[in-house]
Amino acid sequence: MTEINMKINIAGVEWNNPVVTASGTFGFGREYGEYIDLNKLGAICVKGLTLAPRQGNQPPRIAETPAGILNSVGLQNPGVKYFVEHEIPFLKKYTSKIIANISGNTVEEYCSMAELLSDSDVDLIEMNISCPNIKEGGVAFGTNARTVNSITREVKKHCKKALMVKLSPNVTDIKEIAKAAEDGGADALSLINTLLGMVIDINTRRPILANNVGGLSGPAIKPVAVRMVWQVASVVNIPIIGMGGIMTGEDAVEFLLAGASAVAVGTANLIDPTACMKVLEGLENYMYRNNIKDIKEIIGKVEIN
Amino acid sequence: MYKQNYLSKISYKKEIVPGIFDMRVVCKEIAQQAKPGQFLNIKCCEGLTAILRRPISICDIDTKNQEIRFIFQVKGNGTKLLALKKVGDNIDILGPLGNGYYINDQYTNPLLVGGGIGVFPLLMLIKSISSQNSTVYLGFKNKEMVVLEKDFHKVCSNLQIATDDGSYGHKGYVTQLMEKKLQKDPVDIVYACGPEPMLRLVNNTCKKYNIPCQISLEQRMGCGIGACLVCACKIKTTQDWEYKHVCKDGPVFWGNEVIFDD
Ligand SMILES: Cc1cc2nc3c(=O)[nH]c(=O)nc-3n(C[C@H](O)[C@H](O)[C@H](O)COP(=O)(O)OP(=O)(O)OC[C@H]3O[C@@H](n4cnc5c(N)ncnc54)[C@H](O)[C@@H]3O)c2cc1C
Ligand SMILES: Cc1cc2nc3c(=O)[nH]c(=O)nc-3n(C[C@H](O)[C@H](O)[C@H](O)COP(=O)(O)O)c2cc1C
Ligand code: FES
């Protein structure tokens, strides 16, 4: 069999392959480390961090939907300092790149976190301005092109690592937002975060989530995600990490063709703890089957009708 | 060696009362490791319907035949599909998961209290307890819904059943049986599993009589292994409280750690 090259480069950071975990679905890697060899991942993106620890929302925090799930975890996390001290040393043992995902209530909070992480061993910082599950901010920054531009610009000043901006799909024109982030100095983009949704129990007449609404993820959102990655790829020149409902290698290929340079696996982990490995194997099989020697050959190669 | 999910063959299936299925699957690895109070996270079907796994307690283990037994009630989509599976079919199971009940030979006089679908894990528990002096109280809605009576009888002589409507055994709640017993003879530990209102009562009763108790909590789950953080439950800390996770930190907790919201 011929050798295939899976290596990719995201904003100056070389990954062994394009498969990364989606923030919030993989903890800090410890649990899944018991099921898979974490060295085999291109990168590990950890649970969303905030400056101070957060307890998160009241349960129930999850509901099932047709081909998807709705979650309202509300960024339960031990805070960025704890992460730096207690989780990075664990992640450093593996060859996969480390991505810290950060959320804040104010621009200053984002900047402080970027500063703290700049002196740590993370490889990339993913700025989440698209979390639908906390009242104060997150998504408030991500749905307006002007604020996306200014927050990216500010955080960039405090950030010595490559900065990736995670986009919300809950917007009218994703291209405008993506361009605003690129103009603000983003080194990469990731999309999509979850779509705001709701599930009502018709017997109790109450929403299943204690938070009433939550973020929709899983295969149900895949076509929306592929479309958005394609639209964004057509207007920016920075690398894109595509995600939304990826369960198989074939799903991943779709995102790469649409223009993503890497693919994140989220909800699939919750269903199958080896999902990332299956996506990677499926991707490799697609390459062997189609005689593709370098993964970069298919990025953005969708042929539009 | 990495942990994994197992495709396990169904070796037995029976609808024991309307809507409740007794199922056994062959899985050497799970049968060898399982402890009472742990659970399985079961994929009810292939494909994208009922996409999440369903948490179901381990009811019993047959180490000789490498069989795991679980019993489930058909509630929604997933359990409905699981009930359609036939003997010989394979199902995808992740487990054993979570922390089971704390068993210690120092407890010579334990009391087990179960309600509804919460009675299932108590079968493996009672079989794992060495004391011959255990008491078991099981509560059900009505006579028709009484399950596992024979199985418990085989391993425990102090078994009492309660039904909400009095159509079988004691009329009322298991916690009334519990209260009556504790008034005259104390036990050294209470193990409980059942609906939340029952667990609250068990917890309060144990507090009143100053008896340690272990209760098994339920919450909607995703991963089942502690990564997605959806299955939160309120647990006391020295200062205040924090959200722990039923799948990884539980499902069994000490009663005095748990905070039930009003
Ligand atoms: C640790 C643990 C052990 C359990 N053991 C048993 C058992 O031995 N026997 C048994 O019959 N039931 C048990 N349950 C409850 C069982 O998990 C639910 O009844 C089942 O998940 C419902 O799925 P469904 O497809 O019927 O319902 P649906 O309404 O289609 O389920 C939709 C989603 O909600 C979740 N969900 C719905 N109700 C519950 C619930 N009460 N608890 C947790 N998740 C829920 C489902 O898992 C699924 O993700 C246990 C639950 C937990 C947490
Ligand atoms: C349980 C859960 C928790 C999540 N937590 C975060 C988070 O903390 N930060 C973040 O940027 N995205 C979070 N997400 C969104 C995912 O990273 C991803 O963008 C989204 O789920 C779409 O991918 P998927 O369909 O493969 O899951 C979370 C998603 C889920 C399902
Ligand atoms: S179900 Fe994922 S943390 Fe408990």
Image (tube, coloured by chain):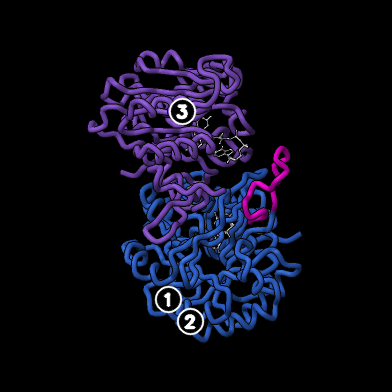
Q: Residue furthest bottom?
A: A157
Q: Residue at x 62, y 46 (%)?
A: A63
Q: Which residues are magenta?
A: A198-215
Give the secondary structure at mark 3.
Answer: strand
Residue B112 visible in image: yes
A129 sits left or right of B33 in the view: right
Residue that mark 2 sits on: A159
Residue that mark 3 sits on: B114
Asked if the stretch drawn in magenta spans residue B45, the answer is: no
B119 sits left or right of B220 in the view: left
Are tags 1 and 3 found on a single chain? no
Q: Pick the residue in front: A126 or B253.
A: B253
Mark 1 touches mark 2? (CB < 8 Å): yes
Q: Mark 3 or mark 2: which is in front? A: 3
Disc 2 marks which amino acid? Cys
Q: Pick the residue in front: A27 or B259.
A: B259
Q: Is mark 1 within 8 Å of ligand 2?
A: no
Considering the image in quadrants, where does the C terminus of chain A appear? bottom right
Q: Mark 1 or mark 3: which is in front? A: 3
Give the secondary structure at mark 2.
Answer: loop
Give the secondary structure at mark 1.
Answer: helix
Residue that mark 1 sits on: A117
Who's purple, chain-wise?
B
Q: Chain of mark 1?
A: A
